[in-house]
Image (tube, rainbow, N blue to C red):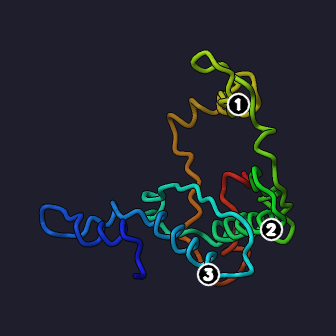
Amino acid sequence: HFLPKEIGEQLLLDRDPHGNVQVSHIQTEILLSTLVKEELKNRSSFKGKFSPVHHFFGYEGRAGLPTNFDATYCYTLGHVAALLIQGGHTGYMCAVNGLAKPAAEWEIFALPITSLMNIERRKGKDKPVIRKALVDLKGAPFKCFERQRIKWMEEDHYLYPGPIQFEGDPELTDLPPKSLIT
C-alpha cells in the first residue's frame, strides 16, 4: 500500500457533483509527512523523533511561478532548517539577512522562537504568545508612507519589473524584489 488510507479514500470517495476528484480536498501535507515517517522508520541510521506540524499551502500551490530569487531564498531557508535538524536544534526560526545583496553574500542565522514570545493573560491564564506587530504611526516606514500616500492615491507609481526571466544574465534573472532595492 503506497498511499495512506486517508489519502486513498480522498482519491476514491471524495467527488464533486460531476464525479471529479476534489483535488483541493486532498491533504498532500499529510501524504508527505506520512511518507517521510515511513522512510525514517525504514532507516536504521535514524534515531531521532519525527513530529510533523502540518500547514495547508493550497493557495500558494496555485500561485505563479517563483522567481530565481524566490527559489534561492526558499532553498536557503530549507538548508538552514536542515542544518538545525542535523544539529538537533528545535524551536528555532530560520532567517536570512542582506537579501538585497547577491545570494553569496547573504547572512544566515536562526532565531530562538522563545525570543519572540511574551507572556500575555488569556482566559485568566498566563500564556506564552508571539506579540502582534502593530503599525507604529511614529515609525519611519509609516512616515514614509504618510509623505507619499496622496501622490500614490492620485497618480500611477507602479514598480513593474517586467516578466520573470529564468535564463540569461544573472543581473536580470536573479534580481531581488523591487521592495528590497527601492
| Cβ atoms at labels 3 and 2 below 8 Å apart | no
Residue position marked by numbered label 1 in the rendering:
128
Given residues 180 and 46, the one toward you in this image is 46
Q: Residue at x 30, y 66 (%)?
A: 10
Which of pointers 3 and 2 lies earlier in the amino acid sequence? Answer: 3
Alpha-carbon span between mark 2 and mark 1:
27 Å
Which of pointers 1 and 3 lies earlier in the amino acid sequence? Answer: 3
Q: Residue at x 62, y 59 (%)?
A: 51
Residue 139 in the image: x percent, y percent? 76, 27
Residue position marked by numbered label 3 in the rendering:
42
Q: Residue at x 81, y 62 (%)?
A: 88
Quarter of the image where one finds residue 178? bottom right
Residue 70 in the image: x percent, y percent? 64, 66
Alpha-carbon span between mark 3 and mark 2:
22 Å
Q: How many marks?
A: 3
Amino acid at the residue labelled 3: Asn
Residue position marked by numbered label 2 in the rendering:
83
